Image: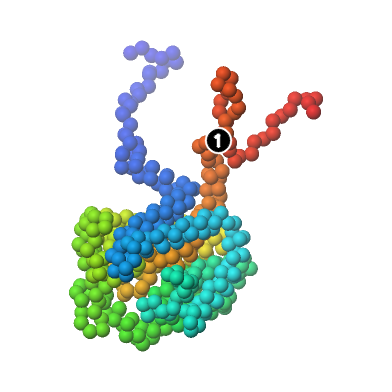
Amino acid sequence: MPGSRTGRPPVQRATRRPAAAPARDNPVLRTADRVRKAWDRPLTAYYLILGGSLLITVLGLVMVYSASQITALQLSLPGSYFFRKQFLAATIGGALMFAASRMPVKLHRALAYPILAGAVFLMALVQVPGIGMSVNGNQNWISLGGSFQIQPSEFGKLALVLWAADLMARKQERRLLTQWKHMLVPLVPVAFLLLGLIMLGGDMGTAIILTAILFGLLWLAGAPTRLFVGVLSVAGVIGVVLIKTSANRMARLACIGATEPKTGVADCWQAVHGIYALASGGFFGSGLGASVEKWGQLPEAHTDFIFAVTGEELGLAGTLSVLALFAALGYAGIRVAGRTEDPFVRYAAGGVTTWITAQSVINIGAVLGLLPIAGVPLPLFSYGGSALLPTMFAIGLLIAFARDEPGARAALAMRQPRFGRKRAGGPGVERGPRRWNTMRRRAPVARPSGER
């Protein structure tokens, strides 16, 4: 074997083995990596909130039209009566959502106290004889003339979220939330004022939602465990007393898990027929508009129990799709609240997310027979303009907060519109490369020396 120029024997190099295929060549891992990257993009929360809320609203309009036709005909009304009212409310709510999504945070904070004052005034006005109306045993409505009514307690949820977020943000800026008295006062007294006005009308379901919002805000504020447990214990005792002193609420509690109607006070007719509707839907449902339970067997088919009609007509696939949309909306709200540095945005986003998530869980849990029937609508989905308008305004809040994230703001600024103004010139004039209008500021062109 010939030696090298240095007289040393040549080095024996090991034979290279083919490198193992990188992990990204695995299609499952590659797909998971793409999903993770897409999930971490700055505009993910913005698109989830906007797209998810619009899909839920549109699907809700379809299901309201399907579930309310028989009820409207039984009342000697046109079949599309409830759908038209819901469509009008959705149109107004869409305008409110767009306006809220374009408002700056300072304007949202400025609206907190007027909205709270207006909500308290209307909720007190409900108890005035001749002004307030009773619907299904609850004195929580005000007639606006004709067939239009308003439920002020629905606006109380939005008022509590905005006012409490502004209050706690100002206290956090002054470093006062470390003292328990500043954390509770005046937040808890004002929340109890709203709860008292609601319970005067007997609406236990809305009171539960307001209580959930209060606990969510206290948790976001970092309330110590003993303080949190103390407030929860007081609310629990009050809730037990209110349930024990009402035969109607005790009957609803007795219908949890019922599979057949009972005799006596707790007949469980609505709860059982909601289960029948879900069970008869199968995997893909009986078809849109082909529900049997809505023909007088299932009360409130287009309001509180619209999820049961959805399961009957669209099957398990339809109900899981609705659940997935609400889960995506809840995740996006938590992400907005967790990534912001603005305390007002964190409290407001957390309060809205708690509101929508808790109300969805209570409504769907009642339809599934896992919770007592609380009489609360499914957000953005059930019939009811009084519930739809403040909810869509709250969704607009989340959209505004998601747009205001630093990464999302930069990503939106970099987007170029698809259509723009082209350079002038006739068909025979040679044109340079197209320039589209953008929102970016162009640097001034450097002028040659001596030019004036």
Q: Quadrant of the C terminus?
A: top right
Q: Nearer the viewer, residue 362 or 64?
A: 64
Q: Nearer the viewer, residue 209 or 88?
A: 88
Q: How many labels does the image show?
A: 1
**Which quadrant of the view contains residue 253?**
bottom left
**Viewer can see residue 434:** yes
- The percent coordinates of residue 45 (x first, y second) are 46, 52
User: Which structural element holds mark 1?
Assistant: loop
- The percent coordinates of residue 242 (x first, y second) are 39, 84
- 82 lies left or right of 429: left
- The percent coordinates of residue 91 (x first, y second) are 46, 57
- 440 lies left or right of 132: right
Q: Which of 31 and 422 is in front in this view?
A: 422
- Report the residue that reaches farthest toward the bottom: 245
Residue at 56 percent across and 54 percent down: it is: 102
Residue at 58 percent across and 67 percent down: it is: 112
Q: Mark 1 points at which residue?
A: 420
Q: Which color scheme did the rendering employ for the protein?
A: rainbow
Residue at 31 percent across and 39 percent down: it is: 27
Circle 1: residue type: Gly
**Viewer can see residue 184:** no
**Which quadrant of the view contains residue 434?**
top right
Q: Quadrant of the N terminus?
A: top left
Mark 1 Cα-neighbour bin, 10 Å: few <14, some 14–19, many ≥20 = few
Vertical side of 134 occupied by 379: above or below? above
Vertical side of 290 occupied by 448: above or below? above
Residue at 28 percent across and 65 percent down: it is: 70
- The percent coordinates of residue 65 (x first, y second) are 33, 59
